[in-house]
Amino acid sequence: MTHPDQATSAAPSPNEAQWIAVASLGLGVFGLVTAEFLPASLLTAISTDLHVSDGSAGQAVTATAIVGAIAAPAMPIVTRSIDRKLVMTGLTLLLILSNALAAVATDLTILLGARILLGVALGGFWSMAGALAMRLVPDHLFARAMSVILTGVSLATVCAAPIGAYIGAEWGWRTAFGAAAILSVVAFGIQIFAIPKLPSIDNPNLQTLGELLNRPNVRTALMIVLLVASGHFAGFTYIRPFLDNVAHFDVNSVSYVLFAFGIGGFLGNIAGGFIAERSEKWAIGLGACIVVVTSLVLILVPTSGLAVSVAIAMWGFAFSAFPVGFQTWIVRAAPDQAEGAGGLLVSAFQIAIASGAILGGLMVDRFGATGAIVYTAAGMCLGAALALALGPKPLKS
């Protein structure tokens, strides 16, 4: 079932598919996720330069997540009368400003301000990306369009952490944020020319969000997001201190292992999409189970370079199944309210990221970097159990 307005306005004929516009959304996602992931690979340098603890520096992730959680459901409502092209390009401008401000931050307060701007851009962009994809391609090409957009996540997963670590080591962490700002400018330029005018058609409001929360499949998906995403970001936000202080990797080794995480993520996005087409609960459940195993490896044999490297690569593979799994779940649960459902999903992710970063930071400051990995294992274990027990039934072939 689809919203009546979407049926008439959001379903172009096959020869009207706007693939360049879809790709420009993927590039925007690439820029957003790159900026979101940068602190994980630069945390040690940031905390040293700004004279704060690793746990305090990690709150740059928390600030982004908290604001993103508010912006995701609010943005479609606040901008409901504004053309979606203007909204999306405006959010990319915020991304540019955030990266530029982070690059010149002289203390933690300024850095947190930059990350707050990123939270607005991230939450708003993600909440509407799926709904816009529905309007840029015919219905039967929607899954393919989402795959293109989510490729931005996969590429950022491959590139952001290792390249950020390398640039940070060679030229300083500020240069990494400056490079991210340049990337954002490129994305903005392409979006200006590629995205067509897209007047708002959904007219979402607070009542819409309440109605969506009354749907059992939507509530279940959001609950599982809170568990698995908080578990992931509790560990991944502090993976650099773990590699530096527990595994005792040098700078080059850190770059290589983060690159392995990214390659695993790229392959995991493909595998996750293949599984999610048939059963989103298995894409999420199996991914969470793999992260539990990799977490145990990091906890039990933290000084084995080979074991740690393989475990982190598998972690990247498993985590990349989550975005496509949850996007597929939420679209199938609420095809008639795509913007509202997307906003709630992004909000849940951001709340989970914030809680994971906060709790992970507390665990790191009290027990060392391994403490955050313990939290990862616990959250993923619960998430896997709930996904496999309560997730929607697989689609029949």
Image (cartoon, helix red, strand yellow):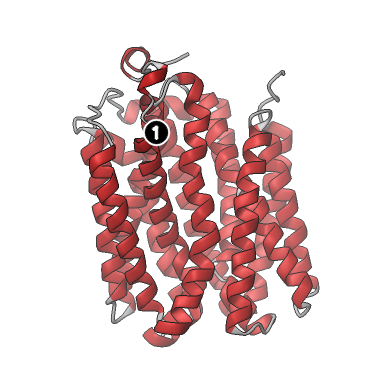
Q: Quadrant of the C terminus?
A: top right
| Identity of the residue drawn at 68% across and 62% down | 313
Q: Is residue 366 visible?
A: no
At x 50%, y 75%, the residue is 165
Q: Residue at x 40, y 61 (%)?
A: 35
Q: Where is residue 296 drawn, in percent x and y?
A: 77, 64
Amino acid found under the numbered disc labelled 1: Trp
Q: Position of residue 192 (x, y in %)?
A: 23, 43
Query: For mark 1, does the 10 Å Cα neighbourhood hold few (<14), some (14 to 19), or many (20 or more) residues?
Result: some
Q: Quadrant of residue 33?
A: bottom left
Question: Image quadrant of residue 292?
Answer: bottom right
Residue tagged 1:
19
Please state which of residues 162 and 393 is positioned toward the viewer in this rendering.
Answer: 162
157 on left or right of 68: right
Question: What is the count of numbered marks?
Answer: 1
Residue 50 screen position, x and y as percent:
37, 84
Task: Kindly identify the residue that appears in the image at 43 percent across and 35 percent down.
Answer: 342
Label 1 sits on a secondary structure element that is helix
Left or right of 317 in this view: 59: left
Residue 73 visible, this angle: yes
Residue 331: % across, % down:
50, 28
Q: Is residue 291 left or right of residue 83?
A: right
State whether residue 249 is above or below residue 99. Answer: below
Front-most of residues 246 and 386: 246
Front in this rendered view, residue 104 or 208: 104
